[in-house]
Image (spheres, rainbow, N blue to C red):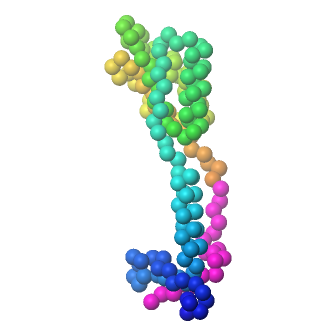
């Protein structure tokens, strides 16, 4: 039947009971499956944990530059670990580090949510920000609207 139509009999679900086969053009099937795999790899977001280090006595220009970089990381979909490093007697004034972390939270409000609240860990104060989820997902096409003209053969 497949030869008469100048097509191939392709096993599309070998693990099903009984195995599912289709009469189709095998070259087109391979091309389409490769395209779908490439598209899914492109759409998948590889999220990493980026880190930005601040000091309690950071200048306003440096603070703005580092915070812009944090915002860029968040826009790309990465989580950001913000570390305020204390040296010497600075560790006795954790409120300075908390002020810096609060300013960062304020600047990134709307594009980031706090995943791990600010806490003192030895000589460092750490805060982890995660990007906000985008709620504007495009609606998907309904299933079963395949126009390939392929016929399913079971047996």
- Outermost residue on the top side: it is 89
Name the spot of residue 107 as percent of width and height, x first.
60, 26
| Residue drawn at 57 percent across, 52 percent down | 43
**Residue 155 visible here:** yes
* Residue 32, placed above or below residue 147: above
* Residue 87, placed above or below residue 39: above
Q: Foreground: 147 or 130?
A: 147
| Residue drawn at 33 percent across, 19 percent down | 122
Quarter of the view holding residue 18 = bottom left
**Residue 115 visible here:** no
Quarter that holds the C terminus = bottom left
Q: How many numbered discs?
A: 0
In magenta segment, residue 82: no
| Residue drawn at 60 percent across, 45 percent down | 134
* Residue 138, placed above or below residue 28: above
Quarter that holds the N terminus = bottom right
Name the spot of residue 41 as percent of width and height, x first.
53, 54
Name the spot of residue 108 as percent of width and height, x first.
59, 29
Q: Foreground: 94 or 10?
A: 10
Direction from residue 147 to residue 118 in the image, left or right: left
Q: Which residues are magenta?
A: 138-155
Quarter of the view holding residue 68 = top right
| Residue drawn at 65 percent across, 50 percent down | 136
């Amino acid at each position: 039947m497949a030869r008469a139509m100048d097509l191939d009999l392709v096993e599309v679900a070998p693990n099903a009971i009984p195995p599912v086969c289709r009469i189709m053009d095998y070259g087109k099937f391979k091309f389409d499956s490769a395209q779908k795999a490439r598209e899914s790899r492109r759409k998948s977001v590889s999220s990493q944990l980026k880190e930005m280090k601040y000091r309690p006595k950071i200048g306003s220009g440096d603070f703005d530059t580092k915070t812009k970089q944090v915002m860029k990381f968040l826009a790309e979909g990465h989580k950001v670990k913000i570390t305020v490093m204390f040296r010497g007697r600075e560790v006795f004034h954790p409120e300075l580090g908390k002020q810096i972390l609060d300013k960062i939270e304020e600047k990134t409000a709307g594009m980031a949510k706090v995943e791990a609240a600010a806490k003192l860990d030895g000589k460092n104060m750490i805060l982890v920000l995660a990007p906000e989820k985008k709620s504007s997902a495009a609606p998907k096409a309904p299933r079963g609207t395949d126009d390939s003209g392929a016929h399913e053969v079971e047996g």
